Amino acid sequence: MRITWRLVLGFLAVSVLALLAALAGPSWPRDGGADRGSGTAAAPSPGRGAARCTVRAGTPREAARLARPGDTVCFDGDLSRRRLVITTGGSREHPVTYAGDGDAVAGITIEADDVIVEGFRSVRPAAPGIELTGHRVTVRNNTVIGPRGGDGDGIRFFGDDLTIARNTVRDTDNGHGRHADCMQTFASGTPASRRVRIEDNRCENVDNMCLMAEGPDDGEGDGRGTTADFTIRGNYCETLRASQALMFEDVRNATITGNVFAAATDHAIGLACHSTGARIGGNTLHPGIRYEVGIDASSRADYQGPEPDGPP
């Protein structure tokens, strides 16, 4: 076939049109979009924005007025100089979530059932940095640094069906006669606690114990109720001045597994005052810890774990 200038120009024109069409390309996103064959737009990713927050409030009081079961409450106002006080919960099936996403608050007080509190940061709050009283309460992914005043505790908890997970408590101070624990519960004018999960938390540079748990019949309690069924798993514990990292008095059925005891306390775990039914195993001990478990005679019943080597 004889090639003429008309054929050359035609070929060039077709090539230019094809190139322009390729450069224009489809309008869907190349990464993170929906399946290209579905014709459905990509859903927005969950996060701080409107897709996650069903209620936005400027103050805790406004949040208490607006929140309904199943809501996720986010705060637009500056809470760094005020304590976040939560008094409105949801239902068993639909708790209310209070989401911080790193927001600074001057401590947290929870007085409600069926709530989730997550993502808040407190630096030098009035102790306890977080105090929760209620049932079916989850506190997770929060940070408490340097709680001051009171007894110096990072977290205190009272009630049933509680989850305390993936929080960090740092720099508690035993000065001025305090007993500044990372976490504490007791039953003296406060509810006894049952079915408590304490998992994957970090207690760093803590002067006193990582957990002090006292039931109603420990000698100082009010004798009402039963403190029982604790799961203590996967936590990092650095306690600097106490004789033990975890202490249980009149607490039944504590399961203590997979924790890291990172400081040289005399012993890691104390069981006293009828703290029966404990199950202990798989913990990692600092080489300076003399023995893992200390126990008194009243707590021996149904104990499972390493042979105790001394008093609690």
Image: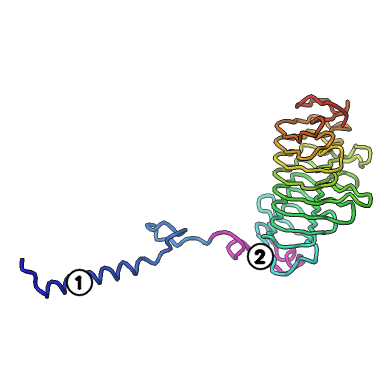
Tell me whether the residue at label 2 lies in contact with that at label 1, contact meaning CB atoms closer than 8 angstroms.
Answer: no
In the depicted structure, whether residue 116 falls above or below residue 219: below
Residue 3, position as x, y percentages in the image:
8, 69
Label placed on residue 12? 1
Tell which tag, 2 or 1, sits nearer the viewer.
1
What SS does tag 2 mark? strand
What SS does tag 1 mark? helix
Residue 90, position as x, y percentages in the image:
70, 55
215 or 88, nearer to the observer: 215
Look at 42% across and 61% down and name the residue there: 30
Classify the position of the N terminus by image quarter.
bottom left
Give the mark, 2 or 1, whose residue is nearer the N terminus: 1
Tell me how far mark 2 sits from mark 1, CA to CA. Answer: 59 Å
Q: Amino acid at mark 1?
A: Leu
Q: Which residues are magenta?
A: 45-67
276 or 26, nearer to the observer: 26
Residue 211, position as x, y percentages in the image:
81, 42
**In this picture, residue 102 sits left or right of residue 173:** left
Q: Residue furthest front?
A: 288
Q: Is residue 205 magenta-colored?
A: no
Q: Quadrant of residue 301?
A: top right
Look at 73% across and 42% down and name the residue there: 236
Q: Is residue 66 magenta-colored?
A: yes
Classify the position of the C terminus by image quarter.
top right
Residue 16, position as x, y percentages in the image:
25, 71
Look at 69% across and 50% down and name the residue there: 92
Q: Amino acid at mark 2?
A: Val
Q: Which residue bears the numbered disc 2?
A: 55
Q: Can I make out residue 84 in this image?
A: yes
